[in-house]
Amino acid sequence: MVADISGLVDLIPLEGKGALRWLARFESWGYAVGARDRCRERSPLAPGAPETPYLFLADPMHQYLLMSGRTSFGGLTFGDLRRLALDIEVVTTDGFEFPSAARPGDRIVAVALADSTGFRQVIRGDHLDEATLLGECVRIVQELDPDVIEGHNIFRFDLEYLEARARRYGVTLAWGRDGSQLAGRPARLQIAERGIGYRRYEVAGRHIIDTWILAQLHDVGARDLPGFGLKEIARHLGVAAADRTYVDAAAIPELFRDDPDRLMAYALDDAVETLGVAGLLAPPVFAQAQLVPFDYQSTALRGAAAKIDALMLRESLRHRHAVPLPGPPAHVGGGHVALFQQGVARPTLHVDVTSLYPSLMLARGIGPASDEAGFFLALLHDLTERRVTAKRLARHASTPLERQHHGALAQSFKILINAFYGYLAFSTGHWNDFAAADRVTVEGREVVTGIIDRLGALGCVPLEADTDGVYFVPPPDHRPDDDDDALLERIAATLPDGIRLELDGRYVAFLSYKLKTYALLDEQGRVTLKGSGFRSRGLEPFQRRLIAEIVRLLLESRGKEVRAVVDRWLEDFARRRVPARMFARTETLGDTLEAYREKIAAGVRSPAAAYELATAAGRIWQPGDQISYYVAGRGVNVTVNEQARLLSEWSVERPDENVEYYQGKVAEIWARFRPFAENEGLRPPLDDEPSPQLDLF
């Protein structure tokens, strides 16, 4: 039977009880794909099903790195890369608010390029027609020969737009080092609980890095970004130049016509900021690419659990050990999450257990039952030791470059270490073990509960607990300069062996709003909002701004001023002083209009304003197009989809926004925060707290 398999070089038996116990090697990629197809024909299971009795890895680079044991960028630092940031600016056809490369009247008017050697150039659409502009972009990419092409939301906008417009003019985007063209395919990325659909592009010999995705990955662990727009990230990370040019996106067509130099400066500043953001967020990914069997671009686009599976697979192949099939899903309990107080607390400390779940796994020897060879805990221990070493080297580094290198290594080790627990409950992980994951959370809850009890015994006031840490008010006689370390030691005195506690933050004030929704005021006067109640995409821009104003006042002990802020917003709406973009809602069409109408007819969904407006506009709309609208009419309780108007229809000369409707939204926010404004301090949370009476006056 073996002799009948075309192109088979050898069939290697693997040791152990794993179901995947034969390694087949072929003369070429074509023969390997043919064998995969034969397996598909003979197996009754779908190729992607976890219990499918064969494994084929569709990325030849991944296969090579797994089998060879090699990784990317050996002996290099992040600074050795030649990185090219790209940003495009486009104009949109009159009557549409958002660009679409499929519309003939839309076009690219600027391609800004900035690289890590200091190269800066804008290819100007006021000097070149669009086809020539695209050709010039190809020439510069080939000439600069970057290792990495970077962009902010480059997969979901810039490259899709460039590809579509190049196709329109018959221009080949020959960006590859071998002269091959840019190629894309649909893909999906899971970041925490959020799935992101995008078009993944690849260029031979180069890596493409999207700083918008890097920001999403960074925020899963750090949870400190104010948003994911380039400008707000750049300001937050401190890479925005003091004299950078800012432009309202709606004014781009006008600027292109009347002040193109300003538009070109804006585009170049975007590219330079992208380079700066990547310079801070990409080094940990670069460091991971030196560890895991994925290339740099794939490392940035793979979830942490997939990286652990790849590390385990590499170890198994290296030792010629059989690979198990993923186990069936089962219930896994969550971490200990609790709200003890509501209101504003001063001051506040945050303690957390250093890598709680990985520490428990190492201390208690908790690993997958299917891991006969013990690779899982050995890898976890090795990465933990490497992180300790990298942190020490970063502290004692003699140059900033050396410090950055070791710091990036330490951060990449931390990311991987913290992913080991999640891997246990990873549905497609070959060594997953849901029972082991549940045991980890059970013991984790016991540790956090013990910390909470200890805080109470020491005279502290616990505020909120979230999986591996606790916010609390220290004892009244606590002196921050002298007593932090001593207090930390007293809290940690009863912790189990192998579990370490660290002071993760000190804050001037902490607003406990509701479970997993809180705000922090640090010693530099910066306010950080956490939780969907403060940052939900379902809020109009003015609501987010109003909430931010109120929260700062509460944190700064100025609760008595909150009502004046609310009254000011009510008055601004009454006098129509609020800019339209502040009360407009922007939504993305997920279905075609035909699919939307079919769902309405079938009764499986309700009418929605964005789709009703798109239908009434009589234009060609595609999934992914965005629509901004506001609510007109009179009264608080209007039917939104009947009173919605396109934002482009709003006129400063004849404003028709529904004043009462938006004042009602202001009143709702006042009702939510009124108890905090009128009753400063802390109080125990109520399980079934009635909704406050809405009050405009």
Image (cartoon, rainbow, N blue to C red):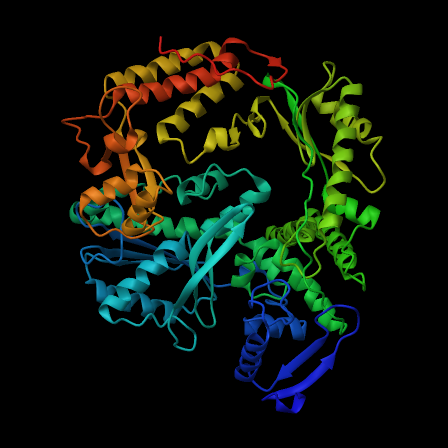
The image quarter in which residue 374 lies: bottom right
Residue 415 vs 202, above or below: the answer is: above
Q: Is residue 118 visible?
A: yes
Image quarter in which the C terminus is found: top left
**Residue 539, image x, y percentages:** 40, 31
Residue 134 vs 351, above or below: the answer is: below
Asked whether 187 or 562 is in front, the reply is 187
Of all residues, the one furthest to the bottom in this rendering is 3
Of all residues, the one furthest to the left in this rendering is 653
Left or right of 228: which side holds 76?
right
**Residue 247, image x, y percentages:** 29, 41
Asked whether 397 or 590 is in front, the reply is 590
**Residue 532, image x, y percentages:** 50, 32
Residue 464 vs 232, above or below: the answer is: above
Asked whether 638 or 220 is in front, the reply is 638
The image quarter in which residue 326 lies: bottom right
Q: Is residue 248 visible?
A: no
Image quarter in which the N terminus is found: bottom right
Residue 667 vs 434, above or below: the answer is: above
The image quarter in which residue 168 lies: bottom left
Left or right of 653: which side holds 465?
right
Left or right of 673: which side holds 411?
right
Of all residues, the one furthest to the front in this rendering is 602
**Residue 32, image x, y percentages:** 57, 81
